[in-house]
Each structure stands twice: as structure tokens, then as C-alpha cells.
Amino acid sequence: MDKLIGREQEIRLLKEYTSSERPEFVAIYGRRRVGKTFLVNQLFGRKLSFSMTGVLDGTKDEQMEAFVDAMQEYSGELVEKPKTWMEAFRVLKAFLKKKAELKQRCIVFLDELPSMDTQRSGFVRALGYFWNSWASLQDNLTLIVCGSATSWMIRHIVDDKGGLHDRITHEIHLRPFTLQETELYLKSHGFKWERLSVMQSYMALGGVPYYLGLLNKQESFAMNIDRLFFSEDEELRREYKRLYSTLFKSPDSYTAIVTALYKVSSGLTRNELRKALGKDSSGSLSKKLEDLVNCDIIRKYVVRNKNVKKSSAIYQLMDFYSIFYLTFVARAEAETNYWSHHIGTSEVNAWLGLSFERLCMAHASQIKQALRLDRIATKVYSWRSKSGKPKAQIDMILERADGIINIFEMKYSDTEYLLDKEEKEKLRTRIARFRKETEVKEALWPTLVTTYGLKKGIHSDIFVATLTMDDLFQ
């Protein structure tokens, strides 16, 4: 059986919430396949007083059958199928009362909660009544609810305006693995890959435990990609539609946003995105963007302008799996071993460069740690020029409280990176335009993040600091 990898903070918090001397209502959310259910089941297992999983796309009747199955398993008694959720929670309350009388800590786990909320089922109201009328008065009860439909979890549970308003005592946003956790996961499963292969797997799959679990240690990275995306089985080719249909009830409008952001790798402002989409028939673009941010699909960046208080925001596609799918899988012909046949092509090299930039941005905290800035107040920005041609952009800027601004150049390379004269002049021009447009007074430090380090040459002196991929694994 797989063991828990990483998740130290989440484990510590869950143990704290299940051993406190007050009632706890914990909501766990995060994208599909990130390991929410696995975390709870591995951590508590037989300690769970009651556990039920909603039936994906199931009817109300099927949800009730699932409730009966779970109740009979935990109580050891025959249970009549409830007609309503109010009745189901009365049955659950009666069962938990017996546990409470024994002075045991009761841990209740309701998984795939959004599935239980079928049309006109009254599920959320019944859950709210169960918590407000009884569960919230039990000092030895912890209720853990979980779901992959992150937008539903946030709107109907975390930020509910009805019976559950301000009732959640804790929330845990379970995010994909970091590079370090990905490496630990692969090593625990017997992989002997060097860090470049681990990093490439992250750039294709992201730190999603389920996707990583599909990798075969007997195969190379390229062989794994061919099998998962370009073979007859192609397990991850079909995952794209499943991912978005699980996260959102109306996935097409969300995938339209994802596709629009994919086409502009530097990202788009909200107004630019609205124009790119042509129209937003639902009139809820802001909510959809917020949903995608909460699901770790896109990222909202602050764009550094002259007036920091009036800085605008830019949305950028950050989900590694979606980027890989849209770059290669969605457009690739039915060709076996497609990936192996295209290694070294301009298309693959361009993907490696852009994905490495996103990898660095996703590990900004590791970069700050490597620069020994984890105890200094910092702000992470992006920047776009407003004038001049071609338009200049700096994807990652680190503004520090000590009067220094790190300007990052992020370069993927199979060997030590050698900066040539042309690239050096481009970097100088971007930095000069940044200072002119923003009128910053701080010292600007060009900082390189690359795979194997910087090869010394006549142009390498422009960088004040250099980080390698090893620093991203901290």
C-alpha cells in the first residue's frame, strides 16, 4: 500500500483538528487526482467513526443507497433507506450519539460532497441543520468534508451565505506536490531517475500524485509519455475532459478560458481575455477566473506598474498537464511513439523553455529560500512594457525589503547555459525599459535560474546570482 509522501503541514493540521477539545468542521478541497481522499484515509483509516463517498454523477436515490451502505458497514445493523437528507442526518446523529457516550473522539468523513448535492435534494440545508443543531455542540466531534469540484466547495461550504455561513472552523487547500515531494514520491516507488527526468515529468504532468502513479520505473521518461499519451491505452489523453467535467458542472466555458490563456503564454488581463473570448454569455467571467485560480489551473499575477497601488493583474495558465495536452496531445495525429520521434524538435524545445519558466514561478518560495530571502519581506511581480516595439515582458520580479529587486531570467538547458551577446543585449534592454517605465530607484539584480548552472563567458558577468534546478528541489 502506498504511504503518505510529503504533506507534513496538512498532516500536522489534521492531527491537531482531530485531537482538539472542541467541535471541528474541516473542509478539504483541491483539483481532481491531487490526493485528498488518500490523505484522509491513510491518516485516519480505522479511526474514522463514519465515512461515506458520494456517487459521481449519481441520482439522489443512488446517493441515499451509498449512505445506507456506509451506515450498515459502520453500525453493523440493517438500515432503512432515508427518503430525504434531513432523515439521513438524523440517522447519522443517532449513530454518533452512541459513540459520543463512550467518550470517543468521533471523526466523520464525507467525501465527494458536491456529488451528494443533486438537484432539489436539500443536501446543503440538511448538512447545515445537522451541524448547527447538534454537531457543533459536540466537543468530541470532527467533521471532515471533501470534494474535487473546488468551486462548489468554496461557494456552498467555505463561503456559504446560508446555514453554513461562518461554520467552517478550518479549511485546507490541498495543492499538487512540489518538485521535492515529486522526487520523494518517485524514489519511494523505486525510480532511479536523475533530476532532469524528474523535472521533465513535472513539466508534463505537474505534481499530481495520481498522474505520477501511472509512471513505470522500468521505462524512461520518453517511453512513459508515449505510453500515457500516444499509445492505444493512452490513459492520460482522456483525462483532459474528465478533469474539467469533474471540477465544473459547465466545463465548456472554463476550457474556453484555458484555451485562450494557452494561446498567449505570457498571459492576459481580464479585459484582454474578455476580448479573446469574444463574449462571455454567462456574464460571470470574474467568478470563472476565481474558480480556475482556486483549482490551481491558472495563476493571478500582479503586474508592476509605475504606481504600485494601481498595479493590474494578469492571468496565466499554470496547469502543467493542461499545457502539455494542448501543446502536443490535442493536435497530435494518431502516431505511436510520437514523443520519442519528436525529441529535439523546435516544438519540444519551445515547450521545455516555457514550461521551465512556469516551473520556476510555481517554486517562487524555493527560489527565495535559495537566495536566503525567506526571512525578508518580499513581493513577487510580473511586468509588461506599455510602449516600444517589440513589447517587453519580465515574468518574475522579486521586490525585497532590503532595497534590491531581483530580475529573473529563466532558461532551460541540457547543459550549462551559455549567455551570448544577443541574449545579453535583450536582457539589458528589458531591464532598462523596466526601470524607465516603473521609475524604481532600487538596485536591479539580474538573476539567472537554469538547469545546470551558468557557463562562464565574456557575457556571463551580467548576472549577480545564479540558481540551478537543484535549488528548485529544496
Image (cartoon, grey):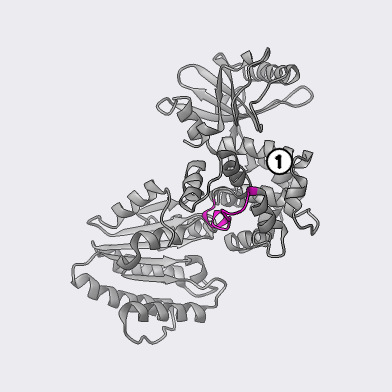
At x 47%, y 28%, the residue is 370
Kind of residue indicated by mark 1: Trp
The residue to which callout 1 is attached is 351
Magenta stretch: includes residue 209: yes
Residue 239 percent location from the top left of the image: 64, 60
Using the image, determine if residue 120 lies above or below residue 159.
below
Q: Which residues are magenta?
A: 208-221
Front one among 209 and 397: 209
**SS assignment at label 1:** helix
Residue 32 percent location from the top left of the image: 55, 58
Magenta stretch: includes residue 261: no
Front one among 345 and 125: 345
At x 44%, y 66%, the residue is 111
Is residue 267 among the parts visible in the rendering?
Answer: no
Marks counted in the figure total 1
Q: Quadrant of residue 443?
A: top right
Where does the N terminus fall, quadrant-wise?
bottom left
Front one among 164 and 398: 398
Question: Does residue 419 appear left or right of residue 166 in this picture?
Answer: right
Magenta stretch, main secondary structure class:
loop
